[in-house]
Image: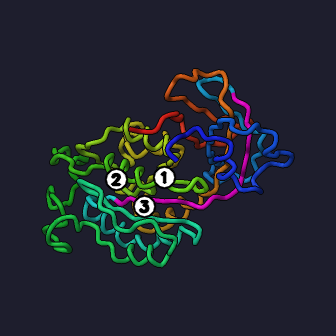
């Protein structure tokens, strides 16, 4: 699927037959009508998923104009996921992620399809899409972070630069103020490559990038704008687990991982310990597959525009919503 605007026939393939609210039938919508599909996550003040929101509690706006919700579903969807792992982390952080990797497999079910990729200065595919969770577990068990240089497993080759005998991440500010070497990690290129893997996966799945990184980003071939267009036109959400003790000190609005998550309707989490990582892996997968699905026929906005903003609201107070901020009517170039 490389367009965000779907025909009714495509949407009916996407929505399970049991997913219509009471009284809704496909016959109410004229065939060949174009629909915009918007997955929405709803959380309470404690961050827990809210499972009982009704269709009439949602409101949706395109380019500031309120739209009528044509179809609604609260069904659970299987996932198409690319697990994208930063392979250029500081030594201590890389060790924590390394020891947690096998727990990722536990977050996926037999109905999900999963691909594995790690990246530093370029993406490195590890496993193509598979529904065999044993294969995912085995590859995660075999994966060795820091192995993008010759001398895999050798401390001098994998530990990276040090300041005052402390391992540091290139390009991330040091507490002591010492300037570090330029960042070589190509985060944006890696996200773009993961998006290319996902955009043509089945319409009956939620498509997500499961990203584990400290957010460092160096020189890239693709731009942030190119990547966001690919993700939005490909129906792909980013769920980021931000690792490393220094990352929460960075401003939220300048954190690239956070920007990707918010723009695509995904989510982001911070983890500084191995047990936090293991807990979050299952939480991310469950949240991604457990979303409300809203669909509407656009009206009142400028039809000739390529990009349209989306805002979802809810009538019930004290709830937080996660939904993508817009869509493209054309495919990414």
Whether the residues at callouts 1 and 3 have beta carbons within 8 Å, the answer is no
Q: Which of 322 and 48 is in front in this view?
A: 322
Label 2 element class: loop
Q: What element carries label 3?
A: strand
Mark 1, residue position? 200
- Residue 168 magenta: no
Residue to which mark 3 is pinned? 83
Q: In this orientation, which residue lies closer to the viewer: 24 or 319? A: 24
Residue reaching furthest to the right = 23
* Residue at horizontal 37 percent and vertical 43 percent from the top: 256
Q: Using the rendered image of the protein, determine whether residue 270 is visible from the camera's viewpoint.
A: no
Counting residues from the start of the chain, the first of labels 1 and 3 encountered is: 3
Q: In which quarter of the image is the C terminus?
A: top left
How would you classify the magenta stretch by its main secondary structure?
strand
Label 2, label 1: how many angstroms apart (C-alpha)?
A: 28 Å
* Sequence order check, earlier mark of 2 and 1: 1
Between circles 1 and 3, the one closer to the viewer is: 1
Question: In the rendered image, which quarter is residue 24 located in?
Answer: top right
Quick check: 320 left or right of 277?
Answer: right
Residue 8 left/right relative to 262: right
Bounds of the magenta segment: 67-85
Q: How many tags in the picture?
A: 3
Is label 2 or label 3 in front?
3
Q: Identify the residue under disc 2.
A: 214
């Amino acid at each position: 699927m490389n367009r965000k605007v779907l025909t009714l026939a495509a949407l009916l393939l996407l929505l399970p037959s049991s997913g219509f609210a009471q009284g809704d039938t496909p016959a109410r919508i004229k065939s060949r009508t174009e629909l915009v599909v918007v997955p929405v996550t709803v959380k309470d003040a404690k961050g827990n998923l809210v499972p009982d929101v009704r269709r009439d509690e949602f409101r949706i706006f395109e380019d500031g104009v309120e739209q009528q919700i044509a179809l609604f579903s609260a069904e659970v969807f299987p996932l198409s996921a690319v697990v994208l792992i930063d392979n250029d982390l500081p030594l201590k952080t890389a060790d924590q992620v390394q020891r947690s990797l096998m727990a990722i497999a536990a977050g996926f079910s037999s109905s999900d399809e999963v691909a594995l990729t790690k990246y530093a200065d370029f993406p490195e595919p590890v496993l193509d899409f598979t529904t065999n969770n044993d294969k995912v577990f085995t590859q995660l068990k075999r994966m060795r972070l820091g192995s993008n240089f010759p001398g895999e497993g050798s401390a001098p080759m994998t530990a990276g630069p040090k300041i005052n005998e402390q391992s540091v991440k290139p390009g991330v500010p040091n507490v002591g103020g010492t300037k570090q070497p330029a960042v070589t990690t190509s985060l944006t290129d890696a996200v773009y490559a993961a998006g290319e893997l996902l955009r043509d996966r089945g319409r009956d799945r939620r498509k997500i990038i499961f990203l584990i990184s400290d957010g460092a980003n160096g020189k890239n071939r693709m731009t942030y704008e190119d990547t966001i267009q690919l993700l939005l036109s490909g129906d792909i959400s980013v769920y980021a687990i931000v690792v490393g003790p220094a990352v929460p000190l960075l401003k939220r609005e300048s954190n690239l991982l956070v920007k990707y998550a918010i723009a695509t309707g995904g989510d982001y989490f911070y983890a500084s310990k191995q047990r936090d990582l293991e807990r979050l892996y299952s939480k991310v997968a469950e949240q991604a597959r457990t979303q409300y699905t809203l669909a509407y026929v656009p009206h009142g906005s400028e039809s000739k525009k390529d990009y349209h903003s989306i805002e979802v609201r809810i009538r019930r107070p004290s709830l937080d919503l996660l939904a993508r901020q817009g869509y493209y009517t054309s495919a990414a170039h």
